[in-house]
């Protein structure tokens, strides 16, 4: 199955749940990536991350061979070791002593095989997934309301809706292409409205018509209030309620009791009465309303209740499964939805069938011809790692996820992993924070090399297709799992020759689901696997082309939900609330997006956003460092003052790990409280304190390679063009910085003699640059304060083959001699346009619209992810 080189391959983006179609062409100059104009999710658009995919395919840091104990070995030995240890553990301690921890970034075929091996052959349900951290509250909410985990609507609904309500979703940054579609629809019909409910003023909130900066954790109150308001104002669809639902009276009574009036809701949610009233009026007036949500709803100890509070208002108004109307949960990962289809969660079976239904279990067992079948839920993610720590689980296999970074209370997770007798890790990258805990490392094929399917937020199944040869000895995840199954003695049931074989079995199993009245059913899918066009399930006899919208004829259930406070309240020791999430250009633990300078320029360092009032009260300085501390751990990050942050709250992104930062790990702080129904962690609410960190020196070093700088308390490594940037701060001032630098460079620095140096020891300032044959190799700048010269300018010097005289003079002076040399922080990742360039051009050419900025600088004209920031800069210039 050799990929056809130099032909354009239709595939799907491996990042977010929008599921954009991608055209990939291998050329002599690398892989060319374009949006697929025919894919119905994106119609040719890609965001900054998707556009940069071609730059993340380098093999330099890949895991290309199996390793045992960090030493290269052959596949036979590695697979025999894994199968042997799992078998042994299983025989000695029983099926529940082993576990898999998998991921919404596996393809459906990989996921299917992992679930089958664990639930049908090992006979335990100890397979959970990072979707527990992501979508599980929505899954639980859907099951309570619909009896099945269903997303009723489709993307087109967002364009048909007169009102789009975004709850706890930074769509502009996390589902950018979908957000562009929503904005385009509003441009086409300016009567359309967008409401954003988020404690922070995000890029999404900036673009919305109404932003409700809600008090963290109070969404149930807001939506209970809405239900009551709609009843009070006679806006409910009683015919729909009558015919299709149950539980209405109890839900309404709860709403009335807990959210009696607009003022009471406003007070509880920390909002102005007028804001709440305006939102309620908009909702009442617009039949065509879609409510979208993601992690601000799910990642809460009340996540499932938040989901049902939203579903309640849609059931009560009959706004569900209709063009332009419906509740719509956005999935995060490319295959979060596929994972739900194969039953990848510890409390699901497969194909939307139920683990606790004996009839379902019997049918799946017969279908798999398996010796046994798990009959009760396994450990949910957070508990799974607790069980590992307590020795109840003695062998774990982790695939396509990085729990050493992404789980809450991550130090406890790391202790558990160190104590575990047998840890297997399947990943594409060799050195991650997790790989340090692996006894066996298995090299998986990466995006572009592997073949399979993923399902996006609107239930659309798309193919990921290979366009690159398999590098080294890397193999598809499904192959690795099937080989282990075979070596455990289950060969007959895992005798797959290709991903297509597995998908065919997945379709066949879905027929049972269809017969059990599940909406998940692929039995009508006729197309050959290789030709499979993007299709929305169900695909059954009645809907052979797939189904954009689900209509309901069965019973839907209201759930009475009572507003509750998050698990841990701030107190005098930890008075601020830490909220965590994502930034525009990074994907999770940065193992891929962290590889390209195109994506690291926007927000290069871990940071904490605080309101300026908190900032000055806490004696913090914008741009300096601060330590965040919680009951669980601490982190050292850059401070950013932001008026969009609520006083009393702090926001820090989840992306940095120990692989690229020292002390930038935010989950060291996050408390492990979980939703009692779904088991999803409360990533958005941990009490913390923020204290200024005052190092003896701040600095940065730019070099041709990565350097450790082990004695710097703060160190962040950032890939840049032709070089690596290191942001540093430390406790010990050097007497001789030149020697200090040479020691850290090692033998490499020995022969270098042409250097420029400036030292002012009294002032604690130092800078130097080493130049070899006219080319700059290394630069170090040290200062007592965080105010240091622009890095972009210095980085650009690493692109010159011979340093110009002005560059040398600038190095000595410690600043660019021409203002034009400092483009500033990258705003537009596609065309590398910086903040300073934008400001200067907007002023000098008196630009007033984003279109004009696009014409002048190209910024914002490709993916559009930076348009919210360009609008903000334009607005600033107007004032
Ligand atoms: N750039 C980028 N895009 C991504 C990803 C990525 O890593 N990077 N990851 C993907 C994945 S897996 C996921 S799950 C999605 C997540 O996508 P989102 O859910 O949009 O992203 P988050 O930043 O985690 O959180 C969303 C917002 O919830 C808000 N929030 C916090 N507490 C509350 C609250 O109590 N109520 C309300 N209403 N809001 C609250 C936060 O302030 C934040 O702005 O993104 C996907 N897309
Ligand atoms: N504080 C905080 N923590 C969070 C969140 C938050 O909002 N705040 N969000 C949570 C959410 S929603 C999510 S989804 C998780 C995400 O967290 P993780 O799943 O831990 O993050 P990733 O970096 O996406 O990890 C994927 C890993 O799989 C590897 N990989 C990529 N492709 C493949 C493949 O095809 N096969 C194999 N075997 N490996 C592959 C990558 O190199 C990487 O190491 O983080 C959760 N953690
Ligand atoms: S919006 Fe961006 S990250 Fe998400 S699928 Fe599309 S291109 Fe990929
Ligand atoms: Mo996620």
Image (tube, rainbow, N blue to C red):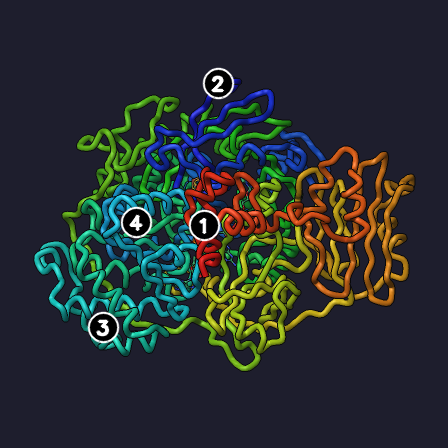
Q: CA distance from mark 4 to mark 3?
A: 24 Å
What residue sits right under mark 3 in the picture?
Answer: 254
Residue identifier under label 4: 149
Q: Is residue 815 left or right of residue 194?
A: right
Give the CA separation, mark 4 to mark 2.
38 Å
**Residue 620 horizontal side relative to residue 863, left or right:** right
> Crowdedness of circle 1 by 10 Å Cα count: few (<14), some, many (20+)?
many
State the image quarter where residue 239 is shown: bottom left
Say which element carries label 3: helix
Q: Are marks 2 and 3 in contact (CB under 8 Å)?
A: no
User: Is there a contact, CB below 8 Å, between mark 4 and mark 1?
Assistant: no
Q: Position of residue 733 (x, y in %)?
A: 83, 64
Label 4's element?
loop
Query: Where residue 181 appears, x then y in whole percent?
Result: 34, 43
Question: Where 840 falls versus 731 (above or below)?
Answer: above
Q: Label 1: which residue?
A: 173
- Tell which circle, 3 or 1, labels the residue nearer the N-terminal end: 1
């Amino acid at each position: 199955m050799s990929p056809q080189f130099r032909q354009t391959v239709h595939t799907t983006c491996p990042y977010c749940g929008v599921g954009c179609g991608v055209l990939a062409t291998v050329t002599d100059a690398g892989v060319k990536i374009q949006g697929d104009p025919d894919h119905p999710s994106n119609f040719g658009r890609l965001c900054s991350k998707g556009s940069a995919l071609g730059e993340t395919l380098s093999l330099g840091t890949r895991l290309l061979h199996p390793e045992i104990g960090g030493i290269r070995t052959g596949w036979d030995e590695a697979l025999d070791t894994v199968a042997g240890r799992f078998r042994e553990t299983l025989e000695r301690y029983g099926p529940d002593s082993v576990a898999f921890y998998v991921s919404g970034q596996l393809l459906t075929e990989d996921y299917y095989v992992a679930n089958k091996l664990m639930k049908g052959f090992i006979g335990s349900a100890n397979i959970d997934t990072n979707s527990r951290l992501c979508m599980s509250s929505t899954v639980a909410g859907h099951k309570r309301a619909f009896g099945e985990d269903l997303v009723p609507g489709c993307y087109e609904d967002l364009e048909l809706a007169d009102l789009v309500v975004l709850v706890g979703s930074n769509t502009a940054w996390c589902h950018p292409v979908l957000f562009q579609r929503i904005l385009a629809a509003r441009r086409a019909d300016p009567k359309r409205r967008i409401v954003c409910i988020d404690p922070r003023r995000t890029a999404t909130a900036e673009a919305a018509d109404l932003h409700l900066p809600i008090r963290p954790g109070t969404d149930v109150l807001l939506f209970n209030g809405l239900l009551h308001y709609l009843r009070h104002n006679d806006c409910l669809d009683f015919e729909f309620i009558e015919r299709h639902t149950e539980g209405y009276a109890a839900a309404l009574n709860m709403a009335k009791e807990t959210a009696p009036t607009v003022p009471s809701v406003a007070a509880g949610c920390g909002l102005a009465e007028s804001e709440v009233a305006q939102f309620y009026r908009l909702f009442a007036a617009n039949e065509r309303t879609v409510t979208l949500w993601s992690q601000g709803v799910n990642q809460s100890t009340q996540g499932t209740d938040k989901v049902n509070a939203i579903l309640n208002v849609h059931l009560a108004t009959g706004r569900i499964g209709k063009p332009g109307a419906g509740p719509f949960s956005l999935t995060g990962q490319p295959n979060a939805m596929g994972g739900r289809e194969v039953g990848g969660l510890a409390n699901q079976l497969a194909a939307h069938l139920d683990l606790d239904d004996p009839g379902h279990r019997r049918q799946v067992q017969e279908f798999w011809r398996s010796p046994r079948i798990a009959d009760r839920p396994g450990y949910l993610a957070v508990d799974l790692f607790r069980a590992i720590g307590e020795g109840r689980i003695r062998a774990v296999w982790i695939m396509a996820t990085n729990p050493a970074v992404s789980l809450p209370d991550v130090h406890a997770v790391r202790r558990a992993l160190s104590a575990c007798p047998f840890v297997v890790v399947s990943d594409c990258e060799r050195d991650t924070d997790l790989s340090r805990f692996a006894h066996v490392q298995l090299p998986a094929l990466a995006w572009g090399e592997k073949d399979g399917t993923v399902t996006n937020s609107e239930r659309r199944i798309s193919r990921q297709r290979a366009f690159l040869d398999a590098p080294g000895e890397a193999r598809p995840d499904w192959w690795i799992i099937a080989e282990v199954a075979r070596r455990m003695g289950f060969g007959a049931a895992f005798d797959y020759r290709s991903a297509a074989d597995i998908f065919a079995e997945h379709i066949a199993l879905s027929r049972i689901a269809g017969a059990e009245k599940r909406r998940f059913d692929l039995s009508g899918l006729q197309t050959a696997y290789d030709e499979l066009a993007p299709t929305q399930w169900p695909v059954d006899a009645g809907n052979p082309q797939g189904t954009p919208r689900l209509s309901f004829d069965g019973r839907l259930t209201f759930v009475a939900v009572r507003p509750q406070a998050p698990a841990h309240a701030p107190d005098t020791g930890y008075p601020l609330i830490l909220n965590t999430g994502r930034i525009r250009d990074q994907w999770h633990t940065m193992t891929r997006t962290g590889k390209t300078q195109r994506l690291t320029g926007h927000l290069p360092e871990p940071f904490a956003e605080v309101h300026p009032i908190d900032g000055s009260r806490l004696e913090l300085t914008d741009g300096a460092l601060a330590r965040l501390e919680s009951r669980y751990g601490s982190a050292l990050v850059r401070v950013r003052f932001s008026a969009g942050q609520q006083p009393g709250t702090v926001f820090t992104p989840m992306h940095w790990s120990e692989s690229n930062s020292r002390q930038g790990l935010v989950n060291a702080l996050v408390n492990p409280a979980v939703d009692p129904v779904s088991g999803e962690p409360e990533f958005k609410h941990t009490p913390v304190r923020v204290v200024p960190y005052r190092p003896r020196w701040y600095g940065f070093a730019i070099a041709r390679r990565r350097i450790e700088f082990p004695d710097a308390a703060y160190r962040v490594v950032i890939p840049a063009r032709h070089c690596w940037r290191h942001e540093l701060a430390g406790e010990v001032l050097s007497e001789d910085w030149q020697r200090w630098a040479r020691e850290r460079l090692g033998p490499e620095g020995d022969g270098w003699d042409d250097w420029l140096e400036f030292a002012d020891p009294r002032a604690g300032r130092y800078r130097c640059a080493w130049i070899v044959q006219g080319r700059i190799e290394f630069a170090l700048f040290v200062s007592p304060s965080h105010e240091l010269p622009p890095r972009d300018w210095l980085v650009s010097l690493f692109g010159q083959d011979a340093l110009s005289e002005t560059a040398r003079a600038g190095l000595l002076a410690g600043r660019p001699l021409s203002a034009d040399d400092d483009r500033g922080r990258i705003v537009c990742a596609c065309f590398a346009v910086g903040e300073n360039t934008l400001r200067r051009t907007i002023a000098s050419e008196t630009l007033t619209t984003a279109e004009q900025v696009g014409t002048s600088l190209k910024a914002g004209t490709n993916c559009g992810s930076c348009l919210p920031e360009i609008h903000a800069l334009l607005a600033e210039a107007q004032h």
